[in-house]
Image (cartoon, rainbow, N blue to C red):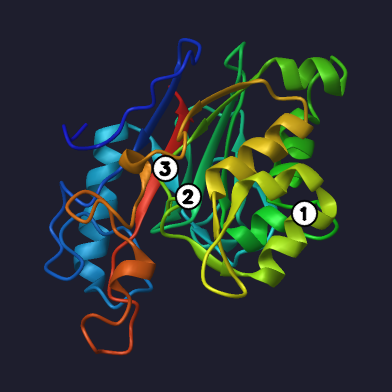
């Protein structure tokens, strides 16, 4: 692994591996320098392909990239799953296949169970996290992730371990009152994840909102992003890509920032 990439610090069982790439370690030129994994942001296709090959080599697994649409669809991966399927979460119990989520401000959430029998990953921007009537991408993913389990849902939740990666932080993520209302209407406790900004605006703690959703599902083992400045993609320009910070900088019509990836796989 590149020394600049993040290796989750969490009690994952033996055989479960995970990594979060940063903007270092690849071959792309500015403004996508250098480890851009997104093939939809204007970067040269050959450079993106080279970076994806570097990721596969580093992990020793096959990263399966999704076509992420800020929804809540979940894909179950196997060796035949093609690249670029429309979904915002994935799970697998097959070895050597990496559930892979691309981000540049949205929150990546990785899951495994205490037995190391399966892994999963979700792309949790605010739209996918909110979903419909409080049922979003994390709820959908857990339903699929727990479906093969022999024990009940409550025990499956207790046996689940979650890691939250870097995302736009609570000091940078300004949203409208309508976004706050979507979360608070379904989870009144979500109000604590919003602080007032300009009139009609709020600053949202995206990682905090995800933790609330995971807690409501019965998951108690959560690690990673605690909302502090070190995890903020916007505030750490030398380490992280950020769509909100960098979009349009190049003036070429693209969101001129790269994409990082959170990967989890079974060795």
Give the left or right position of residue 206, taking residue 18 as reference.
Answer: right
Label 2 Cα neighbours within 10 Å, binned few <14 / some 14-19 / many ≥20: many
* Residue at x 77%, y 25% (from the top left corner): 218
Q: Quadrant of the C terminus?
A: top left
| Residue 76 shows up from this direction | no
The one nearer the camera, 247 or 71, is 247
The one nearer the camera, 134 or 204, is 204
* Residue 185, percent from left and from top: 83, 56
How far is mark 1 from mark 2, CA to CA?
27 Å
CB under 8 Å between discs 3 and 1: no
* Residue at x 73%, y 36% (from the top left corner): 142
Residue at image mark 3 = 262
How far is mark 2 from mark 3, CA to CA?
5 Å
Label 3 Cα neighbours within 10 Å, binned few <14 / some 14-19 / many ≥20: many
Q: Quadrant of the N terminus?
A: top left
* Residue 42, percent from left and from top: 29, 78
| Secondary element at tag 2 | strand
* Residue at x 36%, y 34% (from the top left corner): 19
Residue at image mark 1 = 184
How far is mark 3 from mark 1, CA to CA?
28 Å
Residue at image mark 2 = 101
Which quadrant would residue 242 be assigned to in this image? bottom left
Residue 201's place in the image compared with 168, above or below, is below
Give the left or right position of residue 45, taking residue 85 as reference.
Answer: left
Q: Earlier in the sequence, mark 2 or mark 3?
A: 2
| Secondary element at tag 3 | strand
CB under 8 Å between discs 2 and 3: yes
* Residue 4, percent from left and from top: 18, 37
Which quadrant would residue 3 be assigned to in this image? top left
């Amino acid at each position: 692994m590149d020394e600049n990439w993040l290796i989750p610090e969490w009690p994952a069982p033996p055989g479960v591996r995970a990594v979060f790439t940063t903007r270092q370690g690849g071959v792309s030129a500015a403004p996508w320098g250098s480890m851009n994994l997104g093939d939809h942001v204007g970067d040269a296709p050959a450079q993106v392909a080279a970076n994806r090959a570097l990721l596969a080599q580093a992990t020793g697994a096959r990263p399966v990239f999704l076509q992420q649409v800020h929804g809540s669809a979940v894909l179950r991966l196997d060796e035949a799953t093609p690249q670029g399927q429309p979904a915002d979460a994935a799970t697998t119990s097959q070895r050597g296949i990496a559930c892979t989520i691309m981000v540049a401000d949205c929150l990546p959430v990785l899951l495994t169970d205490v037995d190391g029998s399966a892994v999963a990953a979700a792309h949790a921007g605010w739209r996918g996290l909110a979903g419909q009537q409080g049922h979003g991408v994390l709820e959908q993913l857990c339903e699929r992730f727990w479906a093969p389990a022999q024990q009940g849902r409550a025990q499956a939740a207790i046996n689940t371990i979650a890691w939250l990666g870097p995302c736009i932080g609570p000091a940078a993520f300004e949203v409208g009152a309508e976004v706050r209302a979507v979360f608070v209407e379904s989870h009144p406790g979500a109000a604590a994840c919003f602080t007032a900004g300009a009139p009609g605006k709020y600053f949202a703690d995206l990682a905090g909102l995800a933790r609330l959703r995971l807690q409501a599902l019965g998951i108690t083992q959560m690690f990673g992003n605690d909302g502090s400045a070190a995890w903020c993609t916007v505030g750490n320009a030398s380490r992280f890509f950020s769509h909100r910070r960098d979009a349009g900088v190049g003036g070429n019509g693209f969101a001129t920032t790269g994409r990082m990836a959170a990967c989890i796989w079974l060795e």
